[in-house]
Image (tube, rainbow, N blue to C red):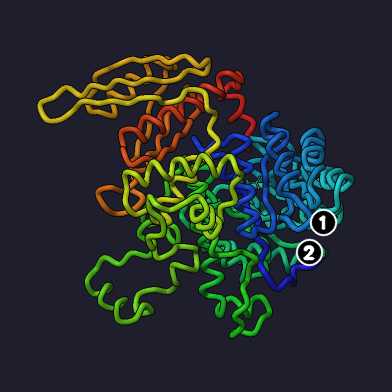
Amino acid sequence: MTNKTDRIIIFDTTLRDGEQCPGATLNIDEKLVIAKQLARLGVDIIEAGFAFASPGDFEAVSKIAKIVGTENGPVICSLARAIKADIEAAAEALKPAVNARIHTFISTSDIHLEYQLRKSRAEVLAIAEEMVAYAKSFMTDVEFSPMDAARSDPEFLYQVLERAIAAGATTVNIPDTVGYTTPSEFGAIIKGIIENVPNIDQAIISVHGHNDLGLAVANFLEAVKNGARQLECTINGIGERAGNASLEELVMALHVRRQYFNPYLGRPEESQESLTNIDTRQIYKTSRLVSNLTGMLVQPNKAIVGANAFAHESGIHQDGVLKNKLTYEIMDAQLIGLTDNQIVLGKHSGRNAFRTRLKELGFELSDTELNKAFVRFKEVADKKKDISDWDLEAIVNDEIQQAPDLFRVELVQVSCGSNACPTATVTLRTPEGEELTDAAIGTGPVDAVYKAINRVVNVPNELIEFSVQSVTAGIDAIGEVTIRLRYESKVFSGHAANTDIIVASAQAYVNALNRLYSALQKQEKPEEVSAQKV
Ligand code: KIV
Ligand code: ZN
């Protein structure tokens, strides 16, 4: 293998590093839904999890390996510390994948060696070499990461990388674990590696970085100019602390500015060929799916996928765009899969039209999922005359989300208004099939509904985030509610869409409570789960 590949490899770590942010915890079925969408998006490698971390993580990696890791599918990867048991778990979980990779890592910065690992450089050097060789005994595709590489002594970094490559690493990944470097520094690190690691031509150079200073994407682009050919990133940039480098920003920067980047990859400047394998038209859909399932909202001004990313508010800008889009737009919204939001379906539309439109939007639903979604579509169409693509997407994402179906909202009724005491009555179906009704008063209708639900479910929790967004404009728009609640040290999210935002609020809350309830049933102690994460 050589670093002279003339395209950029996209390594998606949404399901591993992305899932580590508080509240983004996904269940196995949700991970599978995301993995299938990542495959449709065209990522080269999916880091499906950290198999050793918990039985749930192991099962998720294994299931994704089996279902998504097909002949023409992406490479499926599991993270593993440079420890035999971790590597064995990764290899076992990855067995069903046609193309699999073990990603093993150990810290190399002095600060990590002294305070976290309590090991000498010589020990780390030996472990890296031995564990890469051990991973290699299970499969040919092995990635090695010197954690906190960006703060490591370059001379030591070169030695570790040389030994890891000699032991069989086919990709060496350079993490800026704490998001500390600046673009020129990061570029210089990659350049230094190419110039000082004698066997570097036998491995792909990858980069991994966190966004603590908001520089992760800029750092990666500088790394590309200096020879990095694999980018480790997440959808919507989710991840530990300030997140990871965002996939959509990297891919679109490389696409929109390909003439600028072409020469760095040995291509003629004018080449129009894509620099990645990503189907950019799947970007928006993937972003929405990840946001809905993780409960991590996308800020409106987020580049590429934020609600305002293609909106022009200023009169001067609007005037320019109407005359010629290029005056203020550097890319067409359709490139990321945003349609013009044309009205496509209404209450007279049949199942066939519904199925066809969903297919055009890239949804592949099973018959059961389609039936469920169609019933919801009809309900919404009764209340809302025009159903846009965005509405369809909200309906489908809501219906096929994989939160455990334990408590179910059967009835929500509120009474509120000026000079009134907000009062709510709710009926929930319990996991045992019993219907329980309770009522409460609150500071507003949502507060009253949540208090009434709490009286039924009776699991103490703290609501830490509540947000309502309208899917489209108009008074009859579908409202999407996303909530996050905390139980001890763990955060659970819930999401629901409905034309009635009070009903959506109730459903989103019950959705989050179901996740909490299910975790309690499995007696998954929250502290133990998070302690295992890297
Ligand atoms: O941020 C980091 O260093 C990591 C490594 C495990 C690659 O996530
Ligand atoms: Zn990371």
Label 1 CA crowd tier, 10 Å (few <14, some 14–19, many 20+): many
Residue 20 is marked as: none
- Where disc 2 sits, the SS reads helix
Residue 121 position within the rendered picture, expressed as x and y whole percent measured from the top left: 75, 44
On the rendered structure, is 104 left or right of 283?
right
Please name the amino acid that badge 1 sits on.
Ile
Asked if residue 183 can be seen in this view, the reply is: no
Q: Residue at x 78, y 35 (%)?
A: 89
In the orientation shown, which residue stands out farthest toward the left?
419
Classify mark 1 as within 8 Å of ligand 1 or not, answering yes or no: no
In the orientation shown, which residue stands out farthest toward the right?
137
The residue carrying mark 2 is 200
Above or below, 21 against 317 in this view is: above
Q: Residue at x 61, y 41 (%)?
A: 31
Please name the amino acid that badge 2 sits on.
Ile
Q: Are marks 2 and 1 in contact (CB under 8 Å)?
A: yes
**Residue nearest the observer in this picture, 516 or 86:** 516
Classify mark 2 as within 8 Å of ligand 1 or not, answering yes or no: no
The residue carrying mark 1 is 165
Residue 41 position within the rendered picture, expressed as x and y whole percent measured from the top left: 60, 58
Q: Of label 2 and label 1, which has the lower sequence position?
A: 1
- Where disc 1 sits, the SS reads helix
Q: Residue at x 78, y 62 (%)?
A: 203
Residue 302 position within the rendered picture, expressed as x and y whole percent measured from the top left: 41, 56
On the rendered structure, is 416 left or right of 333?
left
Asked if residue 89 can be seen in this view, the reply is: yes
**Residue nearest the observer in this picture, 197 or 235:** 235
**Residue nearest the observer in this picture, 220 or 471:** 471
Above or below, 4 against 396 in this view is: below
Disc 2 to disc 1, C-alpha distance: 7 Å
Quadrant location of the C terminus in the rendered image: top right
